[in-house]
Image (spheres, rainbow, N blue to C red):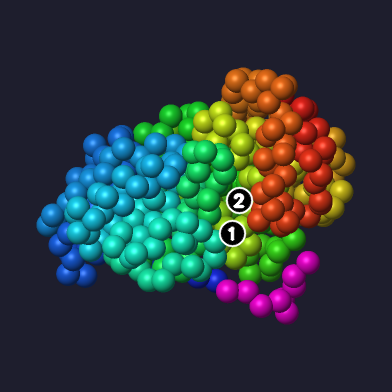
Amino acid sequence: MPDLTTPIVLARPARIVFGPGSVAETGRWIRDSGFSRTLVVADAFNAGRVPLLGIAGEVSVYGEIKAEPDTSDLAAVTRAALEADAEVVVGFGGGSAMDLAKLAAVLPGSGQSLDDVVGVERVRARRARLVQVPTTAGTGSEAGSRALVTDPVSFAKLAVQSDHMLADVAVIDPALTLSMPAAITAATGVDALTHCVEAFTNKKAHPAIDVYALEGIRLVGKWLPRAIADGQDIEARAGMALASLYGGFCLGPVNTAAGHALAYPLGTRFHVPHGAANAAIFPHVLGFNAPAAPERTAAILQALGLPAAADPQAVLTASLDWCRGLDCTMRLRDFGVAACDLPTMAAEAHAIRRLLDNNPRDLSAADILAIYTAAL
Ligand SMILES: [Fe+2]
Protein backbone atom coordinates (compact mmCIF):
# COMPACT_ATOMS: atom_id res chain seq x y z
CA MET A 1 0.00 0.00 0.00
CA PRO A 2 1.24 3.52 -0.73
CA ASP A 3 2.73 5.46 2.18
CA LEU A 4 4.06 8.95 2.85
CA THR A 5 6.93 8.33 0.42
CA THR A 6 4.54 7.56 -2.48
CA PRO A 7 4.16 10.48 -4.91
CA ILE A 8 0.61 11.75 -5.46
CA VAL A 9 -0.92 14.62 -7.46
CA LEU A 10 -3.81 16.59 -5.95
CA ALA A 11 -5.80 18.66 -8.45
CA ARG A 12 -8.78 20.70 -7.19
CA PRO A 13 -11.03 23.44 -8.55
CA ALA A 14 -9.15 26.73 -8.32
CA ARG A 15 -11.93 28.23 -6.19
CA ILE A 16 -14.31 26.40 -3.88
CA VAL A 17 -17.18 28.39 -2.39
CA PHE A 18 -19.00 26.59 0.41
CA GLY A 19 -21.94 27.53 2.57
CA PRO A 20 -25.69 28.19 2.71
CA GLY A 21 -26.67 31.15 0.55
CA SER A 22 -23.58 31.03 -1.67
CA VAL A 23 -25.38 29.99 -4.89
CA ALA A 24 -25.39 33.55 -6.32
CA GLU A 25 -21.57 33.50 -6.26
CA THR A 26 -22.00 31.71 -9.60
CA GLY A 27 -23.33 34.78 -11.39
CA ARG A 28 -20.98 37.10 -9.50
CA TRP A 29 -17.90 35.14 -10.64
CA ILE A 30 -19.11 35.02 -14.24
CA ARG A 31 -19.77 38.77 -14.27
CA ASP A 32 -16.50 39.68 -12.51
CA SER A 33 -14.61 37.47 -14.98
CA GLY A 34 -16.09 39.41 -17.88
CA PHE A 35 -18.09 36.60 -19.50
CA SER A 36 -21.50 37.24 -21.04
CA ARG A 37 -22.64 33.97 -22.71
CA THR A 38 -23.45 31.09 -20.38
CA LEU A 39 -24.89 27.64 -20.89
CA VAL A 40 -26.49 26.03 -17.83
CA VAL A 41 -26.66 22.22 -17.95
CA ALA A 42 -29.43 21.00 -15.64
CA ASP A 43 -32.14 18.43 -15.05
CA ALA A 44 -35.76 19.54 -15.44
CA PHE A 45 -36.18 20.42 -11.74
CA ASN A 46 -33.10 22.60 -11.51
CA ALA A 47 -33.78 24.18 -14.91
CA GLY A 48 -36.75 25.76 -13.13
CA ARG A 49 -34.55 27.52 -10.58
CA VAL A 50 -31.74 28.83 -12.77
CA PRO A 51 -32.50 32.43 -11.60
CA LEU A 52 -31.00 31.47 -8.21
CA LEU A 53 -27.59 31.38 -9.92
CA GLY A 54 -27.82 35.14 -10.51
CA ILE A 55 -26.27 35.06 -13.98
CA ALA A 56 -26.48 38.21 -16.13
CA GLY A 57 -26.06 38.38 -19.91
CA GLU A 58 -27.15 35.70 -22.37
CA VAL A 59 -28.16 32.56 -20.49
CA SER A 60 -29.07 29.37 -22.37
CA VAL A 61 -30.43 26.43 -20.44
CA TYR A 62 -30.19 22.79 -21.45
CA GLY A 63 -32.67 21.36 -18.97
CA GLU A 64 -33.19 17.76 -20.03
CA ILE A 65 -30.46 15.92 -18.14
CA LYS A 66 -31.63 12.55 -16.82
CA ALA A 67 -30.01 9.90 -14.63
CA GLU A 68 -27.35 7.70 -16.24
CA PRO A 69 -26.85 9.98 -19.26
CA ASP A 70 -25.79 8.26 -22.47
CA THR A 71 -24.03 9.29 -25.65
CA SER A 72 -27.20 10.75 -27.20
CA ASP A 73 -27.62 13.02 -24.15
CA LEU A 74 -24.03 14.15 -24.59
CA ALA A 75 -24.66 14.90 -28.28
CA ALA A 76 -27.65 17.08 -27.36
CA VAL A 77 -25.68 19.01 -24.71
CA THR A 78 -22.80 19.50 -27.13
CA ARG A 79 -25.21 20.93 -29.72
CA ALA A 80 -26.66 23.27 -27.10
CA ALA A 81 -23.17 24.52 -26.16
CA LEU A 82 -22.35 25.19 -29.82
CA GLU A 83 -25.63 27.01 -30.42
CA ALA A 84 -25.12 29.12 -27.30
CA ASP A 85 -21.49 29.82 -28.27
CA ALA A 86 -20.96 29.48 -24.54
CA GLU A 87 -17.98 31.12 -22.84
CA VAL A 88 -18.99 29.53 -19.55
CA VAL A 89 -20.70 26.22 -18.85
CA VAL A 90 -22.46 25.77 -15.50
CA GLY A 91 -23.30 22.28 -14.27
CA PHE A 92 -26.39 22.68 -12.06
CA GLY A 93 -27.73 19.45 -10.60
CA GLY A 94 -26.45 16.05 -9.54
CA GLY A 95 -23.58 14.05 -10.98
CA SER A 96 -25.20 13.60 -14.39
CA ALA A 97 -25.57 17.35 -15.01
CA MET A 98 -22.08 18.11 -13.69
CA ASP A 99 -20.44 15.30 -15.70
CA LEU A 100 -22.06 16.43 -18.95
CA ALA A 101 -21.14 20.05 -18.15
CA LYS A 102 -17.49 18.97 -17.95
CA LEU A 103 -17.67 17.44 -21.43
CA ALA A 104 -19.62 20.46 -22.74
CA ALA A 105 -16.71 22.65 -21.62
CA VAL A 106 -14.16 20.74 -23.67
CA LEU A 107 -15.75 18.96 -26.66
CA PRO A 108 -17.84 21.47 -28.69
CA GLY A 109 -15.83 22.85 -31.57
CA SER A 110 -12.70 20.95 -30.51
CA GLY A 111 -12.60 18.45 -33.37
CA GLN A 112 -12.40 15.71 -30.73
CA SER A 113 -15.21 13.17 -30.34
CA LEU A 114 -16.13 11.29 -27.17
CA ASP A 115 -14.23 8.25 -28.46
CA ASP A 116 -11.15 10.42 -28.89
CA VAL A 117 -11.12 11.46 -25.23
CA VAL A 118 -12.24 8.32 -23.33
CA GLY A 119 -9.39 7.44 -20.99
CA VAL A 120 -6.91 9.53 -19.05
CA GLU A 121 -5.73 13.01 -20.11
CA ARG A 122 -6.63 12.72 -23.78
CA VAL A 123 -8.55 16.02 -23.93
CA ARG A 124 -6.43 18.55 -25.84
CA ALA A 125 -7.76 21.81 -24.41
CA ARG A 126 -10.47 23.60 -22.44
CA ARG A 127 -12.96 25.42 -24.71
CA ALA A 128 -15.09 27.20 -22.09
CA ARG A 129 -14.81 28.09 -18.42
CA LEU A 130 -16.58 25.71 -16.03
CA VAL A 131 -18.60 26.34 -12.86
CA GLN A 132 -20.09 23.42 -10.94
CA VAL A 133 -23.08 23.86 -8.62
CA PRO A 134 -24.20 20.60 -6.99
CA THR A 135 -27.82 20.29 -5.88
CA THR A 136 -27.47 16.86 -4.28
CA ALA A 137 -24.95 15.75 -1.66
CA GLY A 138 -23.28 12.62 -2.91
CA THR A 139 -21.47 12.52 -6.22
CA GLY A 140 -18.62 14.90 -5.40
CA SER A 141 -18.43 15.51 -9.15
CA GLU A 142 -17.95 19.23 -8.46
CA ALA A 143 -14.46 18.56 -7.13
CA GLY A 144 -13.21 16.18 -9.79
CA SER A 145 -11.94 15.87 -13.33
CA ARG A 146 -13.81 12.73 -14.40
CA ALA A 147 -17.04 12.34 -16.40
CA LEU A 148 -19.01 9.16 -17.05
CA VAL A 149 -21.29 8.56 -20.02
CA THR A 150 -23.14 5.31 -20.74
CA ASP A 151 -22.73 3.55 -24.09
CA PRO A 152 -26.37 2.64 -24.89
CA VAL A 153 -25.32 -0.43 -26.90
CA SER A 154 -22.76 -2.10 -24.63
CA PHE A 155 -24.15 -0.59 -21.38
CA ALA A 156 -20.52 0.20 -20.53
CA LYS A 157 -19.65 3.35 -18.60
CA LEU A 158 -17.26 5.41 -20.70
CA ALA A 159 -14.91 7.33 -18.40
CA VAL A 160 -13.15 10.52 -19.43
CA GLN A 161 -10.57 12.01 -17.12
CA SER A 162 -8.88 15.32 -17.83
CA ASP A 163 -7.47 18.22 -15.87
CA HIS A 164 -9.19 20.43 -18.48
CA MET A 165 -12.52 19.31 -16.95
CA LEU A 166 -11.70 20.59 -13.45
CA ALA A 167 -14.06 23.40 -12.45
CA ASP A 168 -12.77 26.94 -12.31
CA VAL A 169 -15.24 27.40 -9.48
CA ALA A 170 -17.25 24.94 -7.43
CA VAL A 171 -20.16 26.64 -5.65
CA ILE A 172 -21.49 24.36 -2.93
CA ASP A 173 -24.64 25.76 -1.36
CA PRO A 174 -26.20 23.22 1.02
CA ALA A 175 -29.47 25.18 0.92
CA LEU A 176 -29.96 23.86 -2.64
CA THR A 177 -30.29 20.35 -1.17
CA LEU A 178 -33.08 21.24 1.30
CA SER A 179 -35.74 20.15 -1.18
CA MET A 180 -34.30 16.66 -1.73
CA PRO A 181 -36.76 13.93 -0.73
CA ALA A 182 -35.66 11.57 2.04
CA ALA A 183 -35.06 8.60 -0.28
CA ILE A 184 -32.77 10.60 -2.58
CA THR A 185 -31.03 12.13 0.42
CA ALA A 186 -30.31 8.60 1.69
CA ALA A 187 -29.15 7.18 -1.63
CA THR A 188 -26.93 10.12 -2.60
CA GLY A 189 -25.57 10.27 0.95
CA VAL A 190 -24.52 6.62 0.80
CA ASP A 191 -22.86 7.37 -2.56
CA ALA A 192 -20.68 9.97 -0.81
CA LEU A 193 -19.98 7.41 1.90
CA THR A 194 -18.89 4.76 -0.61
CA HIS A 195 -16.50 7.19 -2.32
CA CYS A 196 -14.79 7.68 1.02
CA VAL A 197 -14.94 3.99 2.04
CA GLU A 198 -13.69 2.67 -1.29
CA ALA A 199 -10.83 5.20 -1.29
CA PHE A 200 -9.92 4.35 2.32
CA THR A 201 -9.70 0.60 1.67
CA ASN A 202 -8.22 1.09 -1.82
CA LYS A 203 -4.98 -0.46 -3.01
CA LYS A 204 -4.01 3.12 -3.92
CA ALA A 205 -5.11 4.58 -0.55
CA HIS A 206 -2.76 7.43 0.35
CA PRO A 207 -2.16 9.36 3.59
CA ALA A 208 -2.90 12.63 1.76
CA ILE A 209 -6.39 11.34 0.96
CA ASP A 210 -7.07 9.10 3.98
CA VAL A 211 -7.76 12.20 6.07
CA TYR A 212 -10.63 13.24 3.78
CA ALA A 213 -11.91 9.68 3.46
CA LEU A 214 -12.14 9.05 7.19
CA GLU A 215 -13.57 12.49 7.96
CA GLY A 216 -16.10 12.06 5.14
CA ILE A 217 -17.25 8.77 6.66
CA ARG A 218 -17.53 10.43 10.07
CA LEU A 219 -19.57 13.29 8.61
CA VAL A 220 -21.97 10.84 6.93
CA GLY A 221 -22.34 8.83 10.16
CA LYS A 222 -23.17 12.01 12.07
CA TRP A 223 -25.30 13.98 9.63
CA LEU A 224 -27.00 11.63 7.15
CA PRO A 225 -29.57 10.24 9.62
CA ARG A 226 -30.44 13.82 10.63
CA ALA A 227 -30.70 15.05 7.02
CA ILE A 228 -33.09 12.16 6.29
CA ALA A 229 -35.17 12.70 9.44
CA ASP A 230 -35.52 16.45 8.85
CA GLY A 231 -34.80 17.66 5.33
CA GLN A 232 -34.92 21.29 6.50
CA ASP A 233 -32.01 20.80 8.94
CA ILE A 234 -29.49 23.10 7.24
CA GLU A 235 -26.65 22.03 9.54
CA ALA A 236 -27.18 18.41 8.57
CA ARG A 237 -27.42 19.38 4.89
CA ALA A 238 -24.15 21.30 5.21
CA GLY A 239 -22.52 18.30 6.90
CA MET A 240 -23.56 16.10 3.99
CA ALA A 241 -22.46 18.66 1.40
CA LEU A 242 -19.01 18.67 3.01
CA ALA A 243 -18.95 14.86 3.12
CA SER A 244 -19.79 14.82 -0.58
CA LEU A 245 -16.98 17.29 -1.33
CA TYR A 246 -14.53 15.17 0.66
CA GLY A 247 -15.73 12.11 -1.25
CA GLY A 248 -14.99 14.05 -4.44
CA PHE A 249 -11.45 14.73 -3.16
CA CYS A 250 -11.08 10.95 -2.77
CA LEU A 251 -12.18 10.22 -6.34
CA GLY A 252 -9.48 12.06 -8.26
CA PRO A 253 -6.18 10.65 -7.03
CA VAL A 254 -7.44 7.35 -5.54
CA ASN A 255 -10.92 6.58 -6.91
CA THR A 256 -13.42 3.87 -6.07
CA ALA A 257 -13.11 0.09 -6.30
CA ALA A 258 -15.33 -3.00 -6.26
CA GLY A 259 -18.39 -1.34 -4.74
CA HIS A 260 -18.87 0.99 -7.68
CA ALA A 261 -17.93 -1.70 -10.21
CA LEU A 262 -20.67 -3.99 -8.86
CA ALA A 263 -23.17 -1.14 -8.68
CA TYR A 264 -22.74 -0.04 -12.31
CA PRO A 265 -24.73 -2.85 -14.00
CA LEU A 266 -27.69 -1.95 -11.78
CA GLY A 267 -27.59 1.57 -13.16
CA THR A 268 -26.93 0.80 -16.80
CA ARG A 269 -29.26 -2.23 -17.11
CA PHE A 270 -32.02 -1.47 -14.59
CA HIS A 271 -31.78 2.32 -14.36
CA VAL A 272 -31.32 2.12 -10.61
CA PRO A 273 -30.16 5.59 -9.47
CA HIS A 274 -26.41 5.60 -8.85
CA GLY A 275 -26.64 6.20 -5.11
CA ALA A 276 -29.34 3.56 -4.57
CA ALA A 277 -27.28 1.01 -6.51
CA ASN A 278 -24.24 1.75 -4.40
CA ALA A 279 -26.21 1.49 -1.17
CA ALA A 280 -27.50 -1.98 -2.07
CA ILE A 281 -23.97 -3.23 -2.82
CA PHE A 282 -22.00 -1.37 -0.14
CA PRO A 283 -22.41 -3.71 2.90
CA HIS A 284 -21.61 -6.80 0.85
CA VAL A 285 -18.35 -5.43 -0.53
CA LEU A 286 -17.36 -3.98 2.86
CA GLY A 287 -17.82 -7.45 4.38
CA PHE A 288 -16.02 -9.19 1.51
CA ASN A 289 -13.05 -6.84 1.75
CA ALA A 290 -12.76 -7.01 5.55
CA PRO A 291 -10.16 -9.84 5.63
CA ALA A 292 -7.90 -7.83 3.30
CA ALA A 293 -8.20 -4.60 5.31
CA PRO A 294 -9.33 -5.53 8.85
CA GLU A 295 -8.03 -2.44 10.67
CA ARG A 296 -9.39 -0.01 8.11
CA THR A 297 -12.74 -1.80 8.02
CA ALA A 298 -13.00 -1.52 11.80
CA ALA A 299 -12.10 2.18 11.57
CA ILE A 300 -14.87 2.69 8.99
CA LEU A 301 -17.50 1.16 11.27
CA GLN A 302 -16.28 3.27 14.19
CA ALA A 303 -16.36 6.44 12.09
CA LEU A 304 -19.97 5.62 11.22
CA GLY A 305 -20.71 5.36 14.94
CA LEU A 306 -20.96 1.56 14.93
CA PRO A 307 -19.00 -0.93 17.09
CA ALA A 308 -15.63 -1.81 15.54
CA ALA A 309 -15.61 -5.18 13.77
CA ALA A 310 -13.55 -6.93 11.11
CA ASP A 311 -15.24 -10.33 10.92
CA PRO A 312 -16.85 -10.40 7.45
CA GLN A 313 -20.27 -11.53 8.66
CA ALA A 314 -20.32 -9.05 11.55
CA VAL A 315 -19.27 -6.23 9.18
CA LEU A 316 -21.94 -7.21 6.66
CA THR A 317 -24.68 -7.39 9.31
CA ALA A 318 -23.73 -4.08 10.96
CA SER A 319 -23.50 -2.11 7.71
CA LEU A 320 -26.62 -3.73 6.23
CA ASP A 321 -28.61 -2.81 9.36
CA TRP A 322 -27.22 0.73 9.18
CA CYS A 323 -28.39 1.12 5.56
CA ARG A 324 -31.78 -0.38 6.39
CA GLY A 325 -32.06 2.16 9.20
CA LEU A 326 -31.83 4.85 6.51
CA ASP A 327 -34.66 3.15 4.60
CA CYS A 328 -32.38 2.30 1.67
CA THR A 329 -33.63 -0.46 -0.64
CA MET A 330 -31.25 -3.31 0.08
CA ARG A 331 -32.67 -6.15 -2.05
CA LEU A 332 -31.79 -6.28 -5.75
CA ARG A 333 -35.13 -7.96 -6.53
CA ASP A 334 -36.86 -4.78 -5.37
CA PHE A 335 -35.18 -3.04 -8.32
CA GLY A 336 -36.62 -5.63 -10.73
CA VAL A 337 -33.49 -7.80 -10.87
CA ALA A 338 -34.08 -11.56 -11.26
CA ALA A 339 -31.70 -14.44 -10.51
CA CYS A 340 -31.29 -15.10 -14.24
CA ASP A 341 -29.88 -11.57 -14.69
CA LEU A 342 -27.05 -12.05 -12.24
CA PRO A 343 -24.48 -13.97 -14.38
CA THR A 344 -24.54 -11.27 -17.11
CA MET A 345 -24.24 -8.53 -14.48
CA ALA A 346 -21.34 -10.39 -12.83
CA ALA A 347 -19.50 -10.72 -16.15
CA GLU A 348 -20.05 -7.02 -16.84
CA ALA A 349 -18.86 -5.94 -13.40
CA HIS A 350 -15.85 -8.26 -13.59
CA ALA A 351 -14.76 -6.50 -16.80
CA ILE A 352 -14.52 -3.08 -15.09
CA ARG A 353 -10.80 -3.48 -14.43
CA ARG A 354 -10.18 0.27 -13.91
CA LEU A 355 -12.07 -0.09 -10.61
CA LEU A 356 -11.66 -3.76 -9.65
CA ASP A 357 -7.88 -3.48 -9.90
CA ASN A 358 -8.10 -0.92 -7.05
CA ASN A 359 -9.87 -3.33 -4.72
CA PRO A 360 -7.90 -4.60 -1.71
CA ARG A 361 -9.16 -8.14 -2.30
CA ASP A 362 -9.30 -9.80 -5.72
CA LEU A 363 -12.80 -10.70 -6.90
CA SER A 364 -13.41 -13.49 -9.40
CA ALA A 365 -16.57 -13.48 -11.51
CA ALA A 366 -17.81 -16.22 -9.16
CA ASP A 367 -17.18 -13.99 -6.11
CA ILE A 368 -19.20 -11.22 -7.75
CA LEU A 369 -22.01 -13.60 -8.59
CA ALA A 370 -22.03 -14.78 -4.95
CA ILE A 371 -22.32 -11.17 -3.76
CA TYR A 372 -25.17 -10.43 -6.18
CA THR A 373 -26.91 -13.63 -5.09
CA ALA A 374 -26.59 -12.68 -1.42
CA ALA A 375 -27.98 -9.22 -2.21
CA LEU A 376 -30.85 -10.49 -4.39
FE1 LIG B 1 -20.46 7.22 -6.89
Q: Is mark 2 within 8 Å of ligand 1?
A: yes
In contact (CB < 8 Å): disc 2 and disc 1: yes
Q: Secondary structure at mark 2?
A: helix
Quadrant (top left, top right, bottom left, bottom right) of the C terminus = top right
Residue 360 as seen in the image, left or right of residue 51: right
Residue 307: in sight, yes or no? no
Residue extent of the magenta highlight: 1-9
How many angstroms separate mark 2 from mark 1 (CA)?
Answer: 7 Å
Residue 52: horizontal and vertical position, in percent? 23, 46
Residue 148: in sight, yes or no? yes
Residue 158: horizontal and vertical position, in percent? 53, 50
Q: What residue is drawn where x is 31% and y is 48%? A: 77
Q: Nearer the viewer, residue 150 or 146?
A: 150
Q: What residue is drawn where x is 34% and y is 56%? A: 104
Residue annotated with mark 1: 250
Q: Is residue 1 above or below residue 281?
A: below
Q: Residue 8 colored magenta? A: yes
As shown in the figure, which amino acid type bears the numbered disc 1?
Cys
Q: What residue is drawn where x is 41% and y is 71%? A: 124
Main secondary-structure element of the magenta-colored stretch: loop
Q: Examine the image and state in which quarter residue 310 appears.
A: top right
Question: Mark 1: few, some, or many residues within 10 Å (few <14, many ≥20)?
Answer: many
Residue 195: horizontal and vertical position, in percent? 60, 50
Q: Is mark 1 within 8 Å of ligand 1?
A: no
Residue annotated with mark 2: 195
Quadrant (top left, top right, bottom left, bottom right) of the N terminus = bottom right
